[in-house]
Image (cartoon, grey):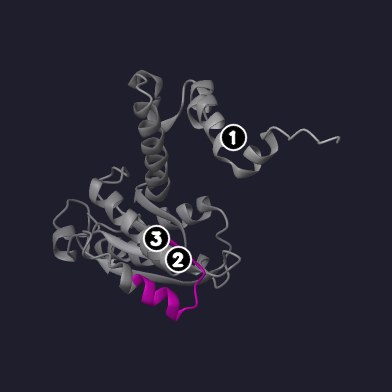
Amino acid sequence: MLDADVEELTEIEGVGEHTALLLKLIPMVQEHYVQSKLKPRTDFSSIGNAANYFMDYYITKNNEQVCALLLDNSNRLIAPVLLHEGTVNSTDVNPRKIARIALAHNAAGIILAHNHPLGDPTPSDADLYTTKQLMHAFEAIDLNFRAHLVVAGNRYKDAVDIVRENQKYAVTYVAFRANNLPEELIGMEGQILLDEQCKRILAPSKTAKKREKKTNPKTVKENRPRKAKNED
């Protein structure tokens, strides 16, 4: 309704021109209020603080926006940046462009965010792919990628956390399958149901230890039989 023109609003029963103008002011007032809370050196050590800011920011946005909070070494705000507005895909979120902006501000860290206006904060496959690309790019320039928040209404999810959990799951899955263990031993999101099995897999086998002992020159020398002394 807030996106409607004044003329369209006045067509609603009980809504006059003054009421319509007031309704049109609500998004601007809300945005001014949110931005007034965002001051230089605001502490974003907690991802929850960033999530609260972005949930307030996106509440009046009906189109997708990609935003970033650039942070210093103490996770305090250097500057907020609007990176893209409109339908978001991986080509719109260019790692080089974001890296250039971060370096221009001498940022040590970054919190990225975009909204899902349809109401589901679950990151799409494209969101996760883009997040992985950004993780690699930011790692190369030593930029701390704190989070990639996907916001929908009063809910959010962190795509960086999901990518990292998926990576742990993939490593665990490979370890289990390499030892011909059934998939049922692997819990959801990479949680291991049998910790002792995991320890056994990751620990060096007795055979490997024996092989290492035999091939270690120091060990071979120590274990070599001593020559009998010639008493003559």
Horizontal side of 84 relative to 80 (left or right) equals left
Q: Does dot 1 land on a helix, a strand or a loop?
A: helix
Q: Which callout, 3 or 2, points at the residue further toward the start of the chain?
A: 2
Q: Does dot 3 land on a helix, a strand or a loop?
A: strand
Residue with the most extreme front position: 232
Q: Which residue is mark 2?
A: 69
Q: Amino acid at mark 1?
A: Lys
The residue shown at (19%, 65%) is 6
Question: Looking at the image, is mark 1 or mark 2 nearer the viewer?
Answer: 1
Q: CA distance from mark 3 to mark 1?
A: 50 Å
Give percent across and percent down for residue 122: 31, 42
The residue shown at (52%, 32%) is 211
Residue with the most extreme bottom position: 104
Q: Residues within 10 Å of mark 1 (few under 14, many from 20)?
A: some
* Residue 228 in which image quadrant: top right
Question: Looking at the image, is mark 3 or mark 1 nearer the viewer?
Answer: 1
- Which range is magenta? 98-112
Q: Looking at the rendering, in which quadrant would you find the N terminus?
A: bottom left
Confirm whether residue 85 shows in the render: yes
Q: Is residue 61 magenta?
A: no
The residue shown at (67%, 34%) is 223
Q: Amino acid at mark 2?
A: Leu
Q: Height in image: 135 above or below 100? A: above
Q: Height in image: 79 above or below 232? A: below
Q: Which residue is mark 1?
A: 213
Q: Which residue is mark 3?
A: 112
The residue shown at (52%, 69%) is 108
